[in-house]
Image (cartoon, rainbow, N blue to C red):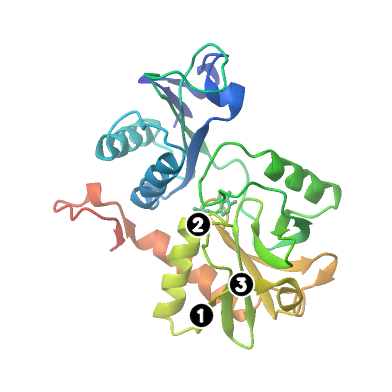
Amino acid sequence: MPELAYVNGVITPLEEARVSVEDRGFQFADGIYEVAKIFDGKLIDLDRHLARLENSARMLELPLPMPLPELGRTCRDLHARSGIEDGVFYLQVTRGACPRVHAAPPGLEPTLVMTTRRLSRPLPEKITAITVPNNRWKMCACKAIALLPTVLAKHAAVKAGVNEAIFVGDDGLVLEGASDNVFCVKDGVLHTPPADGRILEGITRGRVLELAEERGIEVRVAPLPLDEFRAADEVFLTSSVLTVVPVVALDGRPVGDGRPGPVSTVLREAYWDFMRRFRDVTDSPNPSGSSSPA
Ligand SMILES: Cc1ncc(COP(=O)(O)O)c(C=O)c1O
């Protein structure tokens, strides 16, 4: 089960992979990425990740290195070669390598990098968080590799002795975690901020909204003021890597009774069940063109 890297068609052990120092990803963070979970030997929701990648590329007028179906096959091939059962699949596309100049010259070949890694440590079953001011740009719907505000937010979380930082806008609205989407529960109603361009529209967020609806949980997708968020009975975060994880303390105070609440627990179990049932369309004899749970 080797951890592998793919760089523009060349597959190597992860630690041997190299890109040019003139790559625009390195020079300008001029690129986009996706992170998908590898669970039980399956690439969870790869098709949705690739659709979001295409959207990010469109937002930055960044050409993809190959058509989406071919990109999907290339991802699945790398994953199959690595044979990793539980881990993380990373994909990055940059505008390519060229002498350093801000406006990219025409005709650059995009750089495609993919890696497969094993899960390095067990996933947390609950976490703690702080809120931080949102100092990011206005295109948060684009999964761009320019992540300095996220890095600083994560550093603030580490300094505060907690696991995650949650961005709050100047208008007092809760947006999202540094690398996850936020949900809260009040009186049995599930709340989450809208995907209105101020957050990344998480693939896991979408699945959790579908699972909540299937279970008859009332859902309110609407702007979420910080005071309401702080007064919630439950808070949880979602991401491909973390799945669904309850937040038991926020800004040094317990959330609810300080333990994972019932709605968070139901949705966490529902999401894990979804992953267990998930079948990639390429595994099925009769591909229908979209991934769906079996
Ligand atoms: C800012 C941000 N929001 C939300 C998410 C969750 O997205 P997904 O569920 O697609 O992993 C991520 C994941 O990296 C993220 O970086």
Q: Nearer the viewer, residue 238 or 225?
A: 225
**Label 3 element class:** loop
Q: Which residue is mark 3?
A: 223
Q: Which mark is residue 202?
A: 2
Left or right of 158, for residue 279:
left
Q: Amino acid at mark 1?
A: Val
Q: Which residue is mark 1?
A: 219
- The CA span between labels 3 and 1 is 13 Å
**Label 1 element class:** strand
Residue labelled 2 has its Cβ within 8 Å of some atom of ligand 1: yes
Q: Label 1: how many residues lie within 10 Å, few (<14), some (14-19) or many (20+)?
A: some
Q: Nearer the viewer, residue 81 or 27?
A: 27
x and y percentages locating residue 155 in the rendered image: 78, 43
Q: Amino acid at mark 2?
A: Gly
**Whether residue 154 is visible:** yes
- The CA span between labels 2 and 1 is 16 Å
x and y percentages locating residue 98 in the rendered image: 49, 13
Left or right of 63, for residue 158:
right
Residue name at image x 30 percent, y 30 percent: 66
Q: Label 2: how many residues lie within 10 Å, few (<14), some (14-19) or many (20+)?
A: many
Tell whether label 3 touches label 2 (CB within 8 Å).
no
**Label 2 element class:** loop
**Whether residue 272 is visible:** no
Tell whether label 1 touches label 3 (CB within 8 Å).
no
Q: Earlier in the sequence, mark 2 or mark 1?
A: 2
x and y percentages locating residue 32 in the rendered image: 49, 37
